[in-house]
């Protein structure tokens, strides 16, 4: 039985004609940069997230970078985030010249632990008052972080929360849609994300008119009145029109896919919950299921057993960011963030997509369960 880790091909089979048509339209009008599809997509995304502004851009990484730039964060500033995330979340902090700080995660959700964040904020407020300018909260694997607690802390300590929704487009928290859970939300359209295009892409969401204008300026080299008036440092951060065309077709089936994602997740949960630690989605939120990640001290046995049957399973993330060479100068040590470190050793993402069939899931579940039957004997 052939099982893909993320079955993008089945999705393409379903909408190939519509995507082809959309792409043909772009080839005909020839507006490859900032063509009408880009603006149409931004409107659709504003509608979907119930936000005033959506500024599409070149990637999720650039969305994070541009939001830090728009908030004027740079040398002398501190930005706090999770060590259990993709490198992009933290590398952009160093890229603008600010100092990253990590805070350990909650063992249930793998998202920032607000109590530990509170402790770090207390400490930094004593050492260097007012220096924490932002907290980047990551909605890891698709489940939103605890924004209510984060908002309370941001009131006390006066920082901006940036929602890294690269994995959570379509998720909800207290009935609000991800990308609209705090003042600034960013997402990624990397192909394997819940809403992905056929290349790189991203978007930034906000309600503030001035911030939206600044982001649009940063997106095209700090543009002012016109193309050759440059009023701030910016970058080439545009989403290309062909990717917008692809996304316009993908967003049409997105809610249906989300429904299917929930069904696939529920089926895994039903059959694996007694064997391994399955995802713990809090009752006040829903996940977009970027990953279906189980946790087990038998991870290597499970991974090997699945591999013997050509079932792919991936580790996100094998090394927490505080132990990465890119952050060496911050002098973090092994043991600093025990929950993140332990999770890195035990987490395993199973094949997942809205198109995973019951028979395929049964096969995966059966092969995983065999590990435990073998153990008993
Ligand atoms: C994928 C991802 C990003 C970066 O998005 P790109 O579009 O690949 O640049 C940032 N943060 C998280 C949590 C991600 O998963």
Image (tube, rainbow, N blue to C red):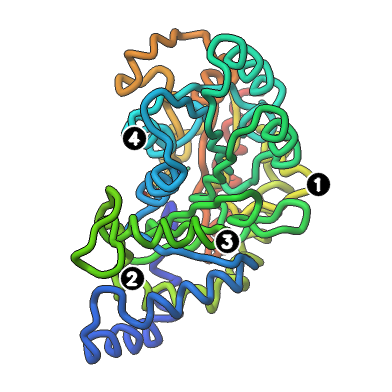
Q: Are marks 2 and 4 in contact (CB under 8 Å)?
A: no
| Residue that numbered label 2 is attached to | 243
Task: Single out the mark in the foreground, 2 or 4.
Answer: 4
Residue ID for mark 1: 283
Q: Is residue 50 above or below residue 120?
A: below
Question: Quick one: 52 or 265, which is closer to the camera?
Answer: 52
Disc nearer the start of the sequence (1/3):
1
Q: Element under label 1?
A: loop
> Upstream in the sequence, badge 2 or badge 3?
2
Relative height, residue 247 to residue 19 (above, below): above
What kind of element bears circle 3?
Answer: helix
Crowding at label 2, few (<14), some or many (≥20) Cα neighbours within 10 Å? Answer: many
Res 242 label = none
Which of the two discs, 1 and 4, labels the residue nearer the N terminus? 4
Residue drawn 59% across the image and 22% down it: 104
Q: What residue is disc 3 on?
A: 359
Q: Is there CB contact under 8 Å for labels 4 and 3?
A: no
**Residue tagged 4:** 96
Please state which of the two labelled residues, at mark 4 or mark 3, is closer to the viewer.
4
Nearest to viewer (mark 1 / mark 4): 4
Alpha carbon distance from label 2 to label 4: 27 Å
Q: Secondary structure at mark 4?
A: loop
Image coordinates for residue 224, horizontal then vertical, percent:
30, 62
Q: CA distance from mark 2 to mark 3?
A: 33 Å
Residue 289's place in the image compared with 260, above or below, is above
Cα distance in 3D space between marks 2 and 1: 35 Å
First in sequence: mark 4 vs mark 3: 4
Nearer-N-terminus badge (2/1): 2
Determine whether 245 is above or below 147 in the image: below
């Amino acid at each position: 039985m052939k099982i893909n880790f993320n079955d993008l091909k089945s999705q393409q089979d379903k909408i190939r004609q519509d995507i082809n048509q959309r792409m043909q339209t772009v080839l005909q009008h020839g507006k490859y940069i900032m063509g009408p599809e880009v603006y149409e997509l931004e409107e659709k995304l504003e509608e979907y997230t119930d936000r005033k502004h959506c500024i599409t851009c070149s990637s999720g990484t650039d969305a994070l970078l541009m939001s830090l730039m728009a908030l004027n964060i740079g040398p002398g500033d501190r930005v706090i985030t999770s060590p259990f995330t993709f490198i992009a979340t933290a590398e952009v902090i160093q890229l603008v010249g600010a100092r990253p700080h990590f805070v350990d995660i909650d063992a249930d959700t793998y998202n920032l632990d607000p109590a530990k964040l509170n402790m770090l904020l207390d400490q930094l407020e004593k050492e260097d008052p007012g220096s924490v300018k932002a907290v980047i909260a990551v909605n890891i694997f698709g489940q939103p972080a605890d924004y209510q607690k984060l908002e309370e802390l941001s009131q006390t300590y006066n920082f901006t929360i940036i929602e890294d929704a690269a994995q959570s487009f379509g998720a909800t928290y207290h009935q609000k849609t991800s990308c609209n859970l705090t003042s600034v939300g960013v997402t990624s359209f990397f192909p394997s994300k819940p809403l992905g295009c056929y290349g790189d892409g991203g978007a930034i969401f906000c309600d503030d008119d001035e911030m939206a204008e600044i982001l649009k300026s940063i997106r095209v080299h700090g543009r002012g009145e016109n193309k050759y008036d440059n009023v701030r440092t910016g970058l080439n951060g545009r989403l290309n029109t062909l990717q917008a065309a692809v996304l316009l077709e993908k967003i049409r089936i997105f809610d249906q896919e989300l429904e299917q994602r929930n069904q696939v997740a529920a089926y895994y949960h039903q059959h694996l919950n007694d064997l391994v630690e399955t995802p713990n989605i809090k009752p006040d939120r829903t996940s977009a299921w970027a990953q279906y990640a189980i946790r087990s001290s038998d991870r290597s046995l499970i991974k090997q057993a699945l591999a013997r049957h050509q079932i792919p399973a991936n580790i996100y993330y094998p090394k927490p960011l505080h132990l990465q060479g890119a952050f060496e100068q911050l002098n973090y040590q092994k043991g600093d963030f025990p929950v993140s470190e332990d999770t890195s050793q035990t987490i395993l993402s199973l094949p997942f997509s809205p198109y995973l069939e019951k028979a395929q899931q049964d096969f995966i579940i059966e092969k995983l369960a065999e590990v435990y039957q073998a153990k008993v004997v």
